[in-house]
Amino acid sequence: MQKTEKAGEDLISIDGTSETPEVFLNSTEGIIWISGRSLPENPKIFYTPIKDWLLEYANKPAPTTHASFKFDYFNTASSKMIMEIIDIIKTVEGNNSKLVMDWYYQEDDEDMYEAGEDFEAVTGVKINYMPYP
């Protein structure tokens, strides 16, 4: 896992691996991007610095926050962390940030599309569904 900055800074960039997603968080631009596969051995350890950064960001977000998720696959343990992340992200709206949330899924991946629908139903966040070939 390679980070360009530590949690709490303006920017976090983590390269994706075969077991962990690529993560790009930029507080200045209001960009949250998580993409790839998520099946780390211990999701709590992987996602805690991300959640900590998001909690800090949510207190003083950019005027517009654009969160994008593009998972190829995630396991059940990661699903809980993703839900917690979406719950944190949605709080930016209460702090005067317009929230745009995109959920990318392969056109033929019904399970990933339905996962996005489940996250939307549980969190109450409006999600834009973005199919790709």
Image (spheres, rainbow, N blue to C red):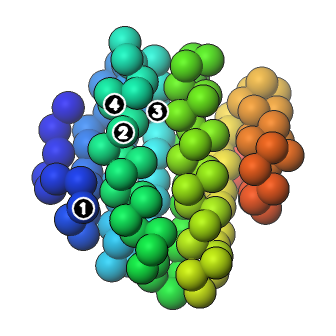
Q: Which mark is residue 24?
A: none
Helix, strand or loop status at disc 2: helix
- The tag earlier along the polypeptide, 1 or 2, is 1
Q: Determine if residue 72 is in view.
A: no
Q: Which mark is residue 8?
A: 1
Amino acid type, mark 4? Phe
What residue is disc 2 on? 48
Secondary structure type for disc 3: strand
To which residue does mark 4 refer? 46
- Check the image and report above or below for 95 versus 75: below
Q: Is residue 9 above or below residue 109?
A: below
> Along the line of sight, which residue is nearer the eye, 104 or 59?
59
Nearer the camera: disc 3 or disc 4: 4
Describe residue 10's horizontal placement relative to residue 87 as left or right: left
Query: Is there a contact, CB below 8 Å, between mark 2 and mark 4?
Result: yes
Badge 2 amino acid: Thr
Q: Residue at x 24, y 54 (%)?
A: 7
Find disc 3 in the rendering and name its residue. 36
Comes first in the chain, label 3 or label 4? 3
Check whether the beta carbons of the residues at disc 3 and disc 4 lie within 8 A of each other.
Answer: no
**Dividing the image into 4 quarters, which one contains the N terminus?**
top left
The kind of residue on which mark 1 rests is: Gly
